[in-house]
């Protein structure tokens, strides 16, 4: 374990960007939408993106276990997983992707000892990529060099919460009372973690179902930017929950 370099975020960024270039032409293309076992949508973009990512990870990290959304939905999740593995979501925000919304992402995270130690998130429609490097979070636009970004301190009276498009008004009000934010902003996919990481929003409370591959890369990016992802009770949020089929409980993601 000790000889393995976990500072691989920049390489993961290259891979998610390559996958992003592959799926972007399929966005708004009227592509066929299939239903997975849980009735959630999957597209040809998910499948092609995943195939490319799995190929690249096998080339660069031979033998390291990969748990990927589409493979898991088709063949099931493993009963056990080692101390080190990758979590991959080739298109997070498939519903947004299908309806032509730009907030969909390509995600890879490296998990070690149940924690996300490296990650990269690409938003192909906007050409933005966030990734971990040397203990901090970098952001780059297509064709540009990366620059460090940081989560911001809580802006009293101006705190922005990121919530899902489908959240009801009374739920948003209850969350505002609980977490003290001032303005809700609706947004899909793991890009919410990245907006927190770059200091353009403050809290993302998730009282609903997610899977580990949905959030691990965003978690890595946010934590390296000075933010946090914790259970509502304030405890560490862990990965590798094979006994729960890699389902997550509730969490709260915050800036500084």
Image (tube, rainbow, N blue to C red):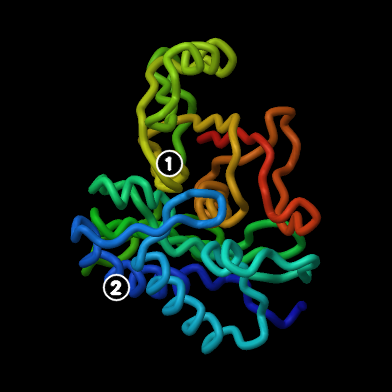
At 76% from the left and 62% from the top, the residue drawn is 113
Q: Nearer the viewer, mark 1 or mark 2?
A: 2
**Disc 1 to disc 2, C-alpha distance:** 23 Å
Label for residue 120? none
**Quadrant (top left/top right/bottom left/bottom right) for the N terminus:** bottom right
Above or below, comparing residue 232 to residue 78 in the picture: above
At 24% from the left and 65% from the top, the residue drawn is 26
Label for residue 22? 2
Q: Which residue is mark 1?
A: 192
Identify which residue, 147 or 186, lies in the foreground. 186
Above or below, comparing residue 215 to residue 132 in the picture: above
At 50% from the left and 49% from the top, the residue drawn is 39
Above or below, comparing residue 233 to residue 196 in the picture: above
Secondary structure, mark 2, is helix
Task: Describe residue 249's horizontal placement relative to residue 153 as left or right.
Answer: right
Identify which residue, 172 or 235, lies in the foreground. 172
Location of residue 29 (image quadrant): bottom left
Residue 47: % across, % down: 42, 70
At 54% from the left and 17% from the top, the residue drawn is 175
Secondary structure, mark 1, is helix
Q: Residues within 10 Å of mark 1 (few under 14, many from 20)?
A: many
């Amino acid at each position: 374990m000790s000889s393995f370099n976990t500072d691989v975020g920049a390489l993961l960024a290259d891979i998610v960007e390559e996958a992003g270039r592959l799926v972007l032409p399929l966005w708004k293309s009227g592509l066929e939408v299939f239903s997975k076992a849980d009735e959630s949508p999957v597209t040809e973009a998910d499948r092609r993106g995943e195939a490319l990512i799995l190929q690249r990870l096998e080339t660069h990290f031979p033998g390291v276990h990969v748990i990927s959304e589409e493979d898991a939905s088709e063949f099931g999740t493993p009963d056990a997983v080692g101390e080190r593995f990758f979590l991959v979501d080739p298109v997070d925000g498939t519903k947004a992707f299908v309806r032509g919304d730009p907030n969909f992402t390509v995600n890879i995270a490296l998990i070690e000892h149940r924690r996300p130690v490296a990650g990269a998130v690409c938003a192909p429609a906007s050409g933005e990529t966030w990734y971990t490097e040397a203990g901090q979070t970098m952001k780059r636009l297509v064709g540009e060099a990366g620059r460090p970004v940081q989560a911001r301190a809580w802006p009293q009276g101006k705190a922005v919460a990121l919530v899902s498009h489908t959240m009801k008004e009374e739920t948003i009000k209850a969350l505002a009372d609980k977490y003290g934010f001032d303005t809700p902003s609706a947004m899909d996919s793991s890009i919410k973690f990245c907006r927190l990481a770059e200091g353009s929003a403050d809290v993302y409370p998730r009282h609903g179902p997610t899977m580990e591959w949905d959030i691990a890369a965003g978690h890595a990016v946010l934590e390296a930017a000075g933010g946090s992802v914790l259970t509502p009770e304030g405890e560490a949020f862990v990965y590798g929950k094979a006994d729960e089929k890699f389902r997550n409980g509730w969490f709260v993601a915050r800036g500084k």
